Amino acid sequence: MGRQPCCDKVGLKRGPWTIEEDHKLMNFILNNGIQCWRTVPKLAGLLRCGKSCRLRWINYLRPDLKKGAFTEMEENQIIQLHSRLGNRWSKIASHFPGRTDNEIKNHWNTRIKKKLKQLGLDPTTHQPIIEEDHSKNGDEEDQTNSSKEEEGVLPKVKPINAQEQQEQPELKLEEATDFLLNNYELLLCGNLDEGDQGPNQESDRSISQSSNSICMEDSSQNQSNSNGESNCSSSSLQEHNNGGGVRRCIDSVDSMLSWDGFDFLEQDLFFEDRF
DNA sequence: AACGGTCGCAACCGCACACGG
DNA sequence: GCCGTGTGCGGTTGCGACCGT
C-alpha cells in the first residue's frame, strides 16, 4: 500500500515564492495562526501545498529568524555539535535561535565541509583523512593516526558510531573537535595575518553577538519550556500553536515589523491597506 | 559581450515518526 | 495492534548569481 502524496499536486504552484504569496501566507498566519498546514494554503488563498507553506514559513518568513552570515563562533559550535550529533540538523539548529536546520545544513555542505577538508579532516567522521592507497591495510591507518597523535599534532580519539554518539553526548571525539576548534585558524594560516591579536574586531563583535544569542537561548529554554521539550524554534510550530497560536509568539504586528527582514512586507502591506 | 564553470541558497522529495481513531 | 493523517527531517535538486576566460 503506497503512501498518499501529502497533497494533490495538480494545479499547485511550485518553485520560488513571490512577494504576493509571502504576503498572503504571512497575513494568514498572523491572523489565524496555524491549525493544520494542509488547510493553510486553501484558507490563505495560495496555490501551494501545505508542506511548501510550512517550509516557506519556517525557513524564510518566521519573524524570529536571524539573518546574515554565520559567525566564526557559530561555525565552531556547528562543527562541535556535528561531531557529537552527526547530520541531525534540526538538533543542531536547536542550539542556534533564529537559525534553521536548512540554513545550517546548507552552510555545512558549502563552507564547513571544505574547511574541514582543508584541515585534513573527514567532515563525516571528524577523523583525519587517510590516503586511499592505505585503505587496503587497516593497520596503516592506525599507524598514520597514532604517529600524528604521538607527535602531538592530533589528539588521541576513538572512532565511535552514530548510535554511540547519540547515547553518549559527551565523548571522545570531542577532544579532537576541541583541538580543531582551538587550532584551526592556526592551521589555516589565513586568519592570523593581522598579527597575534587573534580574531579581528569584526569577529569579536560577531562572537559577542553569538554568545548573546546562546545565552538568550538558554534562558528562553528555561522560561518557556516547562514541559522539558527542546526549544527548537525551527521545528516547534506546534508549540507555538498551542493555546493562542503563532500570535502568542509574535506578540504584535509591531514587534513583527521590527524584524529586519520584514521591511519590505511592511511597506507592501502598508500600500495594500491604503488601496 | 558571450560563454561555461562554480557556488550558494531556496525549495522539493520521500521517508520516518507521532498521534488519534 | 492497525491504519490513516499530519508533521518533521535529511538528502537532493534547480536555478540564479558570480567569476574567469
Image (tube, coloured by chain):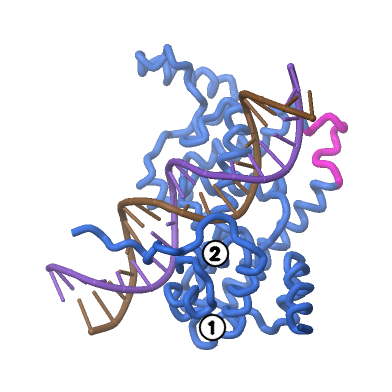
Chain colours: A blue, B brown, C purple
Residue at disc 2, secondary structure: helix
What chain letter is assigned to the residue under label 1? Answer: A
**What residue is pinned by disc 1?**
A245
Q: How many marks?
A: 2
The reply to whether residue A161 is in sight is yes
Q: Which residues are magenta?
A: A191-201
Looking at the image, is A82 positioned above or below residue A148?
below
The quarter of the displayed image where residue A213 is located: bottom right
Residue A4 forms part of the magenta stretch: no
Q: To which residue does mark 2 refer?
A: A234
Q: Indicate the amino acid at tag 1.
A: Gly
Q: Give me the residue at 54% from left, 20% from top.
A: A148
Q: Looking at the figure, which quarter contains the N terminus of chain A?
A: bottom left
Kind of residue indicated by mark 2: Ser
Residue at screen point 69% across, 49% down: A70
Does the magenta stretch mainly form a helix, a strand or a loop? loop
Disc 2 crowd rating (10 Å Cα; few below 14, some 14-19, many 20+) is many
Residue A179, position in %: x, y?
61, 36
Real-space CA distance between mark 1 and mark 2, rounded to the nearest whole angstrom: 15 Å
